[in-house]
Amino acid sequence: MRNLMKELRVGLRQYPRLHGALRVGKAAFARVHPSEIQHQHRRRAERIQTIEQQVQRIEAGRRVDDPAPVLFLNASSDPFTLSFNIATGLVASWGLRVAGQPVTYLVCQGGIGKCVKGTDRAHPEAPPPCSSCVKLHSTWYPAERSVALLPASNANRELTARLGTLTLDELAAYRYGDLNIGGLCLPSARWILRRSDLPADPAAQPVLASYVASAIGLARQLDELFRATRPRALVAFNGTFFPEATARAVALARKIPVVTYEAGYRTLSAFFTSGVATEYPVHIPESFHMGPAEDAELDQYLARRTQGDFTMGGVRFWPEMKGVSPELKAKVEAHRQVVTVFTNVVYDTSQTYVNTIFGGMFEWLSETLKLAAQYPDTLFIVRAHPDELRLGRESQEPIEQWLGRNGPRALKNLVFIPPTEYVSSYELIGLSRFCIVYNSTVGLEAVLLGVPVLTGGLTRYAQAGAAHSPADGDAYVKLLGEFLRDGPPPIPRPQLQAARRYMYYSIFRVGLNLSAFIEPLEPSEYTVGPIEAEDLHPDRSAEMGIIYDGIIHDRPFCYA
C-alpha cells in the first residue's frame, strides 16, 4: 500500500490537472459514508443469492434434454469488484439456466497462477490476491454448479523456472503443442505493464514468463475438462486476456463453439460475438437500411458524444469538455491548413489486430511526423487519447514523452494536446482539412462530420469503406503526401451513408441493452437490478432471447 501511495503522489505531482480531477472525485465519494457502501455491497450479495435460489428452483422443475453444459469463464475482470463484465456473464448464464440449459462456471481458485488483474506492476514477483478473489467470487457462483481451477502441480512450477531463463522473443514465440501460447500471452503482458515496447521494462520477462506458465497450466486443466464434460459451448469475457484467449484456443481445437463478450458502446450495453469481442467484428446484413427513425436516433447519440456525454465499460473519458483556446485559434489562422492526428493508448489489448500497415503506433506516428517537417504551412495537432493517463492505468509510454525523445516535439508546426487537456475533439475535427487516426473510433465520427480520414492501422470500421485505409506503409506515406499537397477528395455521399449505417448498427443493433438487469453501483462497480429469475427467460426478454439463440443456435447476436 505504501508503494502504491508513493506512485500516486509522484503521478499527481507530474499531472496537476489529474490531481484536481482526483480531488473532485474524492469529494464526491466522501459524501457516501463507508457504512452505506458496505450496506450496498451486502444488499447486492443478498440480491444475487436470492436470484440464484430462484434460478435453482426453476431448474429443479424442468427436464434437461441435453446434459452438455455451457461453460462460463471470466478470470480477467477486477478481482475485488462486481464489474459490468462479470454482471453481464452472470445474467446471461441465468438466462440460459431458466430456459433449461445447464451451465457450469469455471472459477479460479489459484489455478491460473499469475493472472492479469492480480499482477502488481510495481512488484511483479508478488503473488496475486487469490484468497480475496476466491472469497468474493464464492458469493456469485454456486459451488454445486462450478468447477474449480486449482493450483498447478510441481511440474508446472518447474516449467515456470525453466521459462524464466528464456528471452522475451523466445517467450513470445513459445508453443505448447499446437497452441501459440506466447502470442496469446503477449497482449496481457503489454496491458498490465502499460507499454507496447516490452524490452524497455525489466519486469517484462518475468511477467511474460509467468503468464506463459500459467497459460500452459490452464490449457492442461481445460483440455482434460473439455474431454470429460464435452461442453455445448464456452462463453468467455473479452477473448484477448490470456486466460480467456487460452480457453478459447483450447475449445476451438476441440471443435467446441466459443462466444466472447465485451462492453458495448452505449451505457449498460454488451457486445456478444462468436469471434473475439475486442476486435468488435460486426456483420451487417445487406437487407439493413437506415430510415428516418434510425437517422434521428444516431443523430441524438452523436450529439451527446460531442458534449462528452457518454461512457464505455463504466469509464467516462471526458469529465469536462472545453473549446479551442484563443492561442490555438491564432496558430490555426497562421497556417494554410490543419491536420489533426488522433493517437491511441499503446498498451490497449483491443488494438492487437491493428498492426497491419505499420509494426506499431509509434512507427506510424514517426512516419507521419516526418512529412510534417516537410509541410511547415500545415499545422499538425497531435491529440493524445484521454484515457492515456487514467488514474491507476497510466501509460508507461505516453505520447508526450515519445515526442520529446524523438525530436518531432520541436517542430514549429506541431501542437500537442495532452490527455489531461479536455479540448473537444469535435472542435478539432471541425478545424481540420482532414484527420489521421491509427484506428480510433473518432475517425469514424470525423467522417460522419464530413471530414476525410486517413488511417494508419486496421480499423473496426474498415468494412464500411468510410476512411482511406492504405495497404502498407509505403502506400500510407504516398497518400499522406498527396493529401498534404493537394488536399483529400471530398467524401462521396454513398461513403457517408455507409459510415452512418455501420455506426448505427454497431451501437444500436449489436449492442444489447442490459439496463433492465444491471445497474451502476459506484464507479467501476455494478449490481444486479431488482428482478425475478423469470424475467431472464429468453421468452420474456428480447436481449436474453438474442443471447440464448446466439449461444445455443449460433444465431446473430443482434436485434432484428
Image (cartoon, rainbow, N blue to C red):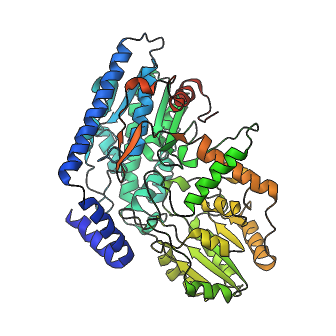
Q: Position of residue 555 (x, y in %)?
A: 61, 29
Instruction: Please report the residue visible at 43 percent of the width from the left and 9 percent of the height from the top.
Output: 63
Q: Position of residue 112 (x, y in %)?
A: 34, 41
Q: Residue at x 43, y 67 (%)?
A: 395
- Most foreground residue, 155 or 65: 65
Q: Is residue 504 left or right of residue 47?
A: right
User: Quick check: 419 above or below 177?
Assistant: below
Q: Position of residue 516 (x, y in %)?
A: 44, 36
* Residue found at x 67% / y 70%: 435
Q: Is residue 200 visible?
A: yes
The one of 361 and 418 positioned closer to us in this rendering:
418
- Which image quadrant: the C terminus? top right
Corner quadrant of residue 339: bottom right
* Vertical relation: 58 (above or below) 190: above
Residue extending farthest left: 35
Quadrant the N terminus occupies? bottom left
Quarter of the figure with residue 83? top left
- Residue 79 lies, in percent from the top left, at 31, 46
Q: In the image, what residue occupies the spot 57% across and 36% down? A: 274
Image: 136 above or below 30: above
Whether residue 503 is visible, yes or no, is no
Q: Which of these two is toward me, 30 or 418?
A: 30
Number of numbered discs overlaid on the protein picture: 0
Relative to 446, does residue 94 appear above or below in the rendering? Answer: above
